[in-house]
């Protein structure tokens, strides 16, 4: 790529030098096109290298975004021992979990929070116990992550052997990859204790696992279960704490800490005397505890509740009302059942002449009389009579609208009048429906035109005559006037077409007596002549003065001509 870049720069320099001596814009344009062609040829030779770089870019874009400097937890072990399930428990990742080996075929990254810090959790594919040169690409991803990341390693062991591998094979894998655990915080996680408890495991197998813990440096031992979630949070907390401690220790042991420690001063308090000072408890708190026999509870305030006659406010309640700790409606709502259960008593905000009347109960007896006696028992019968009277009045109004009873119309004419009124109602309803429709409005120029042979449109003469005859209107004069107008429009159109034809005939007067082939040949020759004239005007421009071409004088022009001949 660097070679191609230098070649392109050289081509650009040569072409700029030649463009300076161009005698026309056309010649300069040709030089520019030639330079671009040479540059493209140079780049085409790099096609294979560019294609390889594109494949590398695509492959790198598919890799997970790993931050090698952040706090990292890395899980490893044989396939199907519970690594992905543990990652789904402690992070928001959704790694596929299946009951067969090598479900995880690449590195998966999740994130979790611990002690207000962001942690990176990496799930690696399963590793088999065989030599390094026999491991495939999937296994090498886990090996590479173990070798190059500074992290806290969680080695999972399935003591139930449901993964298809015995505890001996899992311990053998641990010993084979043990060099990769150097300078890392290591935790051996015994998983699936719900299927096989650690207490009931064989002593020989226990001894094998405990031996791994004792042989490795900075190694801890934990038990957990993903199904019952027993020990999951403890394993996460232990791994995070160990990694935090190691990172702090590494920073303290570095050279940068000395410059920081010189600017820090730590003071330790010293005792001023030998007296012992106990915790001070106020007397009011002690009195409350003694009165409630040690079971003191917070006293609930009645502020916000509707007071009743049975309520008796004491001094404590009065102090709470007058104090600043008045409860809000939200607090009262949650104390009394939450939304939908508790509702405020709006009688508290009633504006009455005497505020003491707000919470009075509505009496049944007032001034020695029963309030229910003032309710009319015949209210239903009176309501029915009122409705009947309204119907009668509506019928009389309709009859008055129809006219007097002694009408001059016979039955057929009355039926026709009724039909006309129904038709008016229908038109009125249709107009409301059409106004409510959300549809585009037809342009006025094409409104009413014929759509096809079955629908000739509202502007057709026959349709107009038929519709107006139904209304009893004579349309003979209107149709005749429309025909005259059409004839005048047609005459103007024919006159305009004839004038255009006359102009064309005047232009083609010189081709009378020629055949069609000769006419075509003559037109073709004219077009070619025009093209030839334009090209000659561009290429054969008049010679210019040396000063106009950027040269100093005629001697400089001679030098340029000699260089061009070479």
Image: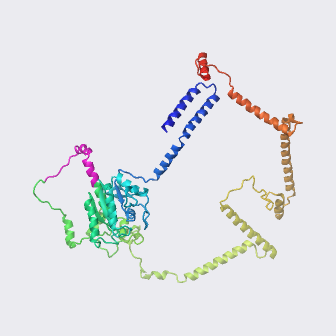
Left or right, residue 525 beside residue 106: right
Q: Position of residue 502 (x, y in %)?
A: 86, 39
How many numbered marks does the figure carry? 0
Q: Does the rendering let one see residue 298? A: no
Q: Residue at x 61, y 30 (%)?
A: 31
Which of the two residues, 324 or 192, is positioned nearer the viewer here?
A: 192
Vertical position of residue 526 compared to residue 139: above or below: above
Q: Residue at x 67, y 59 (%)?
A: 439
Which of the two residues, 8 or 473, is positioned nearer the viewer here?
A: 8
Vertical position of residue 337 compared to residue 9: above or below: below
Q: Residue at x 44, y 59 (%)?
A: 105
Q: Position of residue 92 (x, y in %)?
A: 40, 61
Quadrant location of residue 348? bottom left
Which of the two residues, 238 or 138, is positioned nearer the viewer here?
A: 138
Q: Does the rendering let one see residue 193? A: yes
Quadrant location of residue 11? top right
Vertical position of residue 88 compared to residue 490: above or below: below
Residue 249 lies within the magenta run: yes
Left or right, residue 474 beside residue 203: right
Q: Position of residue 343 (x, y in %)?
A: 41, 70
Location of the C terminus (image quadrant): top right
Magenta stretch: give its range: 245-270
Q: Residue at x 82, y 64 (%)?
A: 470
Q: Position of residue 134 (x, y in %)?
A: 40, 57
Residue 221 lies within the magenta run: no
């Amino acid at each position: 790529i660097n070679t191609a870049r230098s070649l392109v720069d050289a081509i650009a320099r040569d072409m700029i030098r030649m463009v300076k001596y161009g005698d026309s814009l056309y010649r300069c344009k040709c030089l520019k096109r030639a330079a671009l062609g040479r540059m493209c040829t140079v780049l085409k030779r790099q096609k294979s290298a560019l294609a390889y770089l594109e494949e590398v870019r695509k492959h790198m874009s598919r890799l997970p975004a790993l931050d090698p400097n952040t706090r990292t937890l890395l899980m490893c072990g044989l396939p199907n021992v519970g690594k992905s399930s543990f990652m789904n428990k402690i992070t928001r990742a959704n790694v596929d979990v299946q009951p067969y080996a090598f479900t995880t075929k690449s590195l998966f990254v999740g994130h979790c929070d611990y002690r207000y810090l962001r942690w990176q959790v990496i799930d690696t594919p399963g590793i088999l116990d065989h030599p390094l040169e026999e491991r495939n690409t999937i296994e090498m991803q886990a090996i590479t992550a173990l070798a190059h990341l500074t992290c806290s390693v969680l080695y999972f062991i399935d003591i139930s052997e449901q993964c298809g591998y015995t505890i001996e094979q899992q311990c053998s894998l641990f010993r084979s990859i043990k060099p990769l655990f150097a300078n890392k915080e290591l935790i051996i996680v015994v998983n699936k204790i719900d299927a096989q408890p650690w207490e009931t495991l064989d002593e020989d197998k226990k001894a094998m696992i405990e031996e791994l813990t004792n042989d490795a440096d900075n190694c801890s031992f934990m038990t957990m279960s993903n199904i019952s979630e027993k020990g999951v949070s403890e394993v996460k907390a232990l791994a995070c704490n160990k990694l935090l401690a190691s990172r702090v220790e590494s920073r303290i042991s570095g050279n940068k800490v000395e410059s920081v420690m010189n600017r820090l001063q730590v003071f330790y308090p010293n005792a001023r005397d030998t007296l012992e000072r106990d915790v001070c408890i106020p007397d009011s708190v002690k009195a409350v505890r003694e009165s409630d026999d040690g079971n003191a509870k917070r006293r609930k305030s009645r502020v916000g509740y509707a007071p009743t006659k049975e309520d008796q406010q004491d001094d404590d309640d009065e102090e709470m009302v007058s104090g600043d700790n008045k409860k809000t409606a939200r607090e009262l709502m949650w104390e009394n059942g939450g939304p939908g259960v508790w509702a405020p008593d709006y009688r508290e905000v009633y504006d009455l002449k005497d505020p003491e009347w707000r919470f009075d109960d509505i009496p049944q007896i007032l001034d020695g009389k029963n309030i229910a006696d003032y309710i009319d028992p015949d209210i239903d019968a009176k309501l029915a009579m009122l409705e009947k009277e309204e119907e009668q009045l509506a019928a009389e109004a309709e009859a008055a609208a129809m006219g007097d009873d002694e009408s001059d119309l016979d039955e057929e004419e009355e039926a026709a009048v009724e039909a006309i009124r129904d038709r008016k109602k229908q038109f009125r309803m249709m107009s409301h429906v059409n106004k409510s429709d959300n549809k585009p409005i037809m342009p006025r120029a094409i409104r009413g035109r014929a759509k096809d042979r079955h629908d000739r449109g509202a502007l057709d003469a026959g349709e107009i005559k038929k519709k107006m005859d139904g209304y009893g209107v004579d349309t003979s004069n209107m149709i005749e006037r429309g025909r005259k107008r059409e004839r005048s429009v047609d005459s103007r159109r024919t006159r305009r077409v004839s004038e255009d034809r006359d102009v064309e005939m005047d232009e083609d007067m010189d081709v009378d007596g020629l055949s069609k082939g000769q006419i075509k040949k003559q037109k073709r020759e004219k077009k070619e002549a025009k093209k030839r004239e334009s090209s000659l005007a561009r290429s054969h421009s008049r010679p210019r003065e040396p000063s106009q071409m950027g040269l100093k004088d005629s001697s400089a022009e001679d030098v340029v001509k000699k260089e061009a001949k070479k």
